[in-house]
Amino acid sequence: MDIAKKELVVNLCLLSLVLSILNGALVVHINNSLVSDTPYVSGPGDFVVFVFFFLILYGFHAVVSFFHFAAAAFARRSLVTRLAVFNAAGLALVGAIYVYIQDVTVLFLVSSLGIFSLVTAVIYRKKVVD
C-alpha cells in the first residue's frame, strides 16, 4: 500500500477520531454562542450536544484528511510544498466555516491543522531517517 494511502487511513481512523472527541468535549464545556442558547447543556443533554458536535467535527476532520491526501499527491516528495498546500486549503476551509458561523470558537480548528502537520512531519522524518 502506498505511504500516502496508509497516512489517509491512519488520519481517518485514528487521528480524526481522537481530534473530534477532544474538540467535541472542548466545545461542549466552553460557554459560547454555539451551545449557550440550548437549555440542556448541563445534565444528560451534554452527551447529545457532544455527539452532535463530534459528528460535525469528524466530518470536518475527514475532509481535512482528504485535503492532506490530495496535498501528498500534488507535492510528491517535498514536505514543505505538501504542508504549504495542505495548510492553505485547511485555512481556507476554516475561514469559510468562520464566515458562515460567525463565531470565534471555530478558529480552534486551526489547531487541528497544526496537529495534522506535526504528525506528517514526524512520519516524514522517521521515513527519511530509516
Image (cartoon, grey):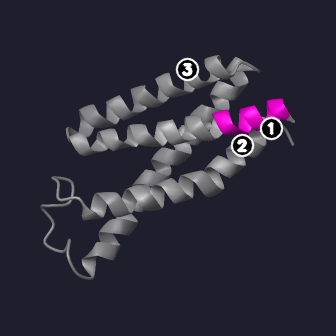
Q: Which quadrant of the rendered structure holds the N terminus?
A: top right
Q: Residue at x 40, y 37 (%)?
A: 110
Residue lying at the far front of the rendered structure: 129
Q: Which quadrant of the rendered structure holds the C terminus?
A: top right
Pick whichever of labels 3 and 1 is earlier in the sequence: 1
C-alpha distance separating marks 3 and 2: 17 Å
The magenta segment: 121-129
Residue 7's disc number: 2
Residue 84's disc number: 3
Label 3 neighbourhood size at 10 Å, few (<14), some (14-19), many (20+)? some
Residue at which label 1 appears: 3
State the SS at label 1: helix
Q: Name which quarter of the figure residue 83 lies in.
A: top right
Q: Is residue 100 above or below residue 19?
A: above
Provide the major secondary structure of the magenta segment: helix
Is 60 on the left or on the right of 34, as rendered? right
Q: Name which quarter of the figure residue 66 lies in.
A: top right
For the residue marked with disc 1, what is the amino acid? Ile
